[in-house]
Amino acid sequence: MEISQAGIDLIKQFEGFSAKPYLCPAGKLTIGYGHVITAKEDFCVGGIDVFAAERLLKQDVSMVGNAVSTMALVALSQNQFDAICSLAYNIGRKAFEKSTLLRYLNANKQGMAANEFMRWVYAGGVIQSGLVRRRQAEKSMFSGDNNEL
C-alpha cells in the first residue's frame, strides 16, 4: 500500500516547509518537510526548494509506508494507512513499532488504536499544541472522519 496525496498533504500541513536547515525539537538537522539530513547530504549552501522537498518527503514516506505495511498485520483502509504513516513519519519507525497503537491495531481493536494517537502529543515532557492538532487530524483521518481535517 502507498500513501495517498491526502496523506502527503496532511504531513506537509503539520511539518511545514523550511528551505534552510534547522534543528527539529528532537535536535536533528532537518530541512524541507521534516526530512532529517543524513551525513551524506549537504543543504547548507542554497537550501532546498519546495519541489525537491516534496521529492524527499515522498522518498521518506515511502520507506515509512513499507515499514508500516510490514508491521501492520491487519488490512488497513487508505485513511488508516495515511494516518499511521503521518504518525510514524513524525515519531519515527522504531517508536511506532513499540507503540500500544500498533498493538491494538494488530489485535483488531480499531477504536482503541484510534484513541492512542492522542498519547503522542508530548515533546520534552510538555504537551505541544501543534502535536495535539496533528494527532486530532490523524485520528480523524484514521477513523474516516474527513470533515474534521
Image: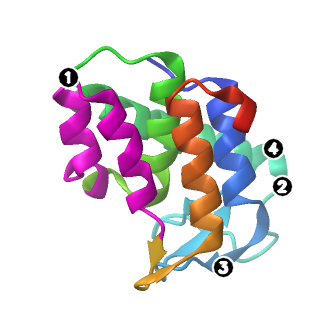
Residue at screen point 68% across, 56% down = 14
Nearest-to-viewer mark from 2 and 1? 1
Badge 1 or badge 4: first in the primary sequence = 4
In 3D space, how far apart are the residues under numbered discs 2 and 4 (Cα atoms)?
6 Å
Region of the chain picked out in magenta, as a range:
95-121
Q: Is residue 111 left or right of residue 17?
A: left
Nearest-to-viewer mark from 3 and 2? 3
CB of mark 1 within 8 Å of CB of mark 4?
no
Q: Is residue 106 left or right of residue 122?
A: left
Residue to which mark 2 is pinned: 49
**Could you tell me residue 6's position as x and y percent?**
69, 29
Residue at screen point 40% across, 39% down = 114
Q: How is the image coloured?
A: rainbow
> Residue 6, relative to residue 49: is it above or below?
above
**What secondary structure is the stretch in magenta mostly built from?**
helix
Indicate the secondary structure of the residue bearing disc 1: loop
CB of mark 2 within 8 Å of CB of mark 4?
yes
Badge 3 or badge 2: first in the primary sequence = 3
- Few, some or many residues within 10 Å of mark 3 (<14, 14–19, 20+): some
Towards the viewer: 149 or 82 = 149
Q: Which mark is residue 51?
A: 4
**Could you tell me residue 59's position as x and y percent?**
54, 39
Residue to which mark 3 is pinned: 22
Nearest-to-viewer mark from 1 and 4? 1
- Few, some or many residues within 10 Å of mark 4 (<14, 14–19, 20+): few
